[in-house]
Image (cartoon, rainbow, N blue to C red):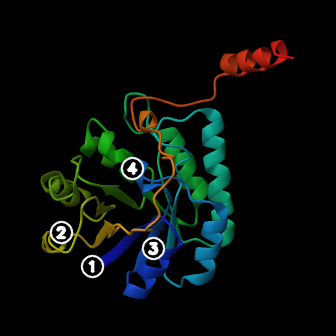
Amino acid sequence: MLLEICAPNYQSAINAQNAGAHRIELCCELAVGGLTPSYGLVRQVMNDLKIPVFVLIRPRSGNFTYTNDEFEVMKRDIQLYKDLGCSGIVSGVLNPDYTIDAQRTKELVEFSKPLAFTFHRAFDWTPNPLEAMETLIQLKVDRILTSGQEPTAEKGLKLLNELHKKANNRITILPGSGVNTNNVAIFKDSGFTEIHTSASKITNTNIEPIISMNSPKFFNETIGIESDYETIKNILNKLKDEK
């Protein structure tokens, strides 16, 4: 069974290779489900790792329905990481109703070639997962990272097994979320050929922050965040008034 480690930083990537993992998915910001890692991080990891590196392409947190500009950013990032020699791309796009955005996902798959393409856990938001899987098969996606539309893959095992059976070797179903030493055998015994986990532990820096840099109001997948034109203009006008 192939073990893919979701690595959110350089040390995680090194630990994955040294421990014997077969592949990594490189990203950042696990707290929001993972985002596109920086160019510097990808370059350093590609320089120091010998195992395959897949790179997550997700330009922001929140939903998986992107503007035209965000979509262009995604394609530019894919080109950057193709040029660095990564082995695969992990990405995907949904329509506003959470169905697969077939046109844009097809563009990403084509743009990623000849690299492998994994459709990420946006799949777990789709209203009809079996239909969504058939769409992704038609789009030549190589694998689907999914928890079986449950908080953890163990809880989603029923759907995972159904997807795996219906896939019939046409696409790889990659179980992920909450996979650990206590339950990994369940997935191997069920016939899955690959498994995904961050294998995370909490490390203590022993440094107490003077003030928190977290913004709890932003940790909400039902909202979007953008700098507002009118607010910016009002601030500038206020500054002018204070002269």
The x and y percentages for residue 46 are 60, 76
Closer to us: mark 2 or mark 3?
3
The image quarter in which residue 206 lies: bottom left
Q: Amino acid at mark 1?
A: Met
Q: Which mark is residue 12?
A: 3
Residue for badge 2: 187
**201 vs 27: above or below:** below
- Please report contact status of discs 2 and 3: CB closer than 8 Å, yes or no: no
Which SS class for mark 2?
Answer: helix
The x and y percentages for residue 32 are 42, 48
**143 vs 180: above or below:** above
Which SS class for mark 3?
Answer: helix
Closer to us: mark 4 or mark 2?
2
Give 220 or 235, whichever is nearer the viewer: 235
Sequence-first disc among 4 and 1: 1
Q: Amino acid at mark 3?
A: Ser
Sequence-first disc among 3 and 1: 1
Q: Residues within 10 Å of mark 1 (few under 14, many from 20)?
A: few
- Please report contact status of discs 4 and 2: CB closer than 8 Å, yes or no: no
Q: Which mark is residue 1?
A: 1
Q: Residues within 10 Å of mark 3 (few under 14, many from 20)?
A: some
Gap in angstroms between the C-alphas marked 4 and 1: 23 Å
The N terminus lies in which quarter of the figure?
bottom left
- Please report contact status of discs 1 and 2: CB closer than 8 Å, yes or no: yes
Q: Is residue 233 left or right of residue 219?
A: right
Residue for badge 4: 136
Which SS class for mark 1?
Answer: loop
